Image (tube, helix red, strand yellow):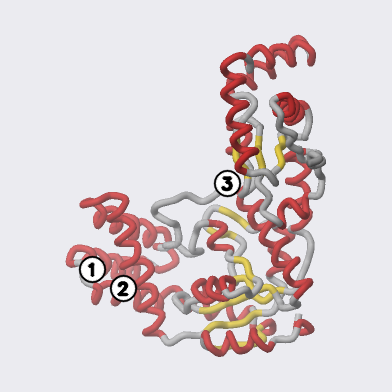
Amino acid sequence: MNPRSDSQDYHRIFLNDTPLLDVRSPIEFSKGAFPTACNIPLMSDAEREQVGICYKHAGQEAAIALGHRLVSGETKANRLQKWQDFTQKNPTGYLYCFRGGLRSRTVQEWLRQAGCDYPLVVGGYKAMRRFLLEQLEVTAPLLRLAGQTGSGKTELLQQLIQEGYPGIDLEKLANHRGSAFGRNPDDHQPTPINFENALAIDWLKVRHAYLTHPRPILIEDEGRAIGRLAQPLAFYNHFRQQPVVVLTAPFAERVDRILDEYVQQQRLVFQRLYGEHGSQHHRDFMLTALDRIRKRLGGVCHQQIRNCMLQAFESNSDILHRQWIETLLKAYYDPMYDYQLRQKKDQIVFSGNAGEVREFLNHIQPALT
């Protein structure tokens, strides 16, 4: 079999979720990487720093020689074995370094000497990153899925995506549910670069799907900020100009959904994380989230909700939890949503419950957008 060629077909690499062997240093990888990349570095952070200092003071040849001395013997053998293991598990993959230069070609050559021809990505991480940023500036027909807090927007969107409808779950990519209470207690948000990379890849995929089955791409209507992350400006500017579909749900159903997501389900998460102290951590987590919007609620309303929340946790009462949720919706989230919706009234193309929204999407014409 002829060895595969090096590639700069970034479109195909990301569209196919191609496995990627990232040989950059760990600190480079931590700042920004791709979802299918595995970091098995040529040099550790300390080794790379030594080589960099040598390059600055003695030039390229001396730096290369130092690099070969640092990565030699047993160190080289151990890393080579890890690269070989990766290539065997991922025969369709590619390797890369920052610019597709010395580091990736060194690893490629060492693999070749060991009997493995493995291709690299021409241009490396820098070229692929630039390609993804360019994708975020490409436009395509969109529909923004809006709805009051607790209406089930995320749930409906995830169901539709699983069923094959083209859509992007921004909250999943950002690992945040897009509200004051939205941070996941057991995980952290990705770095801004990793969020942009993941969003660009999803955007590339749904645009590709649109070419074969033209339907507007569905994305939950979010502000630019999602937790501490922000949608890339070019993408967001296109996003906010698109038509809006409003998902409606009865008030009691919305309260039930919030109770389930933020109280009952999170209770289990905190118990898993903190054992017998889970309830206390859950309470503190929710109180801190509430305190973040104290000024917007006003002192009296904030204190009323806080007292009710405290009593609910102390007595483990879903009835009391339901009371503070109802007050929070009526005093804060619903008025804010109604104001935001008025700003978008000229962009609304449909409003209905989950079944009606599904029916609308099934019959929507691409010409709408």
* Residue labelled with disc 1: 312
Marks 2 and 1: CB-CB under 8 Å?
yes
Instruction: Examine the rendered structure and indicate whether residue 34 appears above or below residue 114.
Output: below
Against 270, residue 119 (above or below) is above
Taking depth in this image into account, of 41 and 114 the one nearest to the observer is 114
* Residue 193 appears in the figure: no
- x, y percent for residue 183: 45, 57
Residue 53 image point, x, y percent? 68, 15
- Contact between labelled residues 1 and 3, with CB atoms less than 8 Å apart: no
Mark 3 vs 2, N-terminal side: 3
Cα–Cα gap, marks 2 and 1: 9 Å
Q: Nearer the viewer, residue 346 or 282?
A: 282
Residue drawn at point x = 51 percent, y = 71 percent: 154
Residue picked out by circle 3: 191
Callout 1: 10 Å neighbours few (<14), some, many (20+)? some
In the picture, which quadrant includes the C terminus? bottom right
Q: Residue at x 40, y 76 (%)?
A: 329
Q: Compare residues 47 and 369 and report the one nearer the observer.
A: 47
State how far apart marks 3 and 2 are (Cα): 33 Å
Q: Which of the 4 quarters of the picture holds residue 169?
A: bottom right
Which three-letter amino acid code belongs to the residue tagged 2?
Answer: Trp
Amino acid beneath label 3: Thr
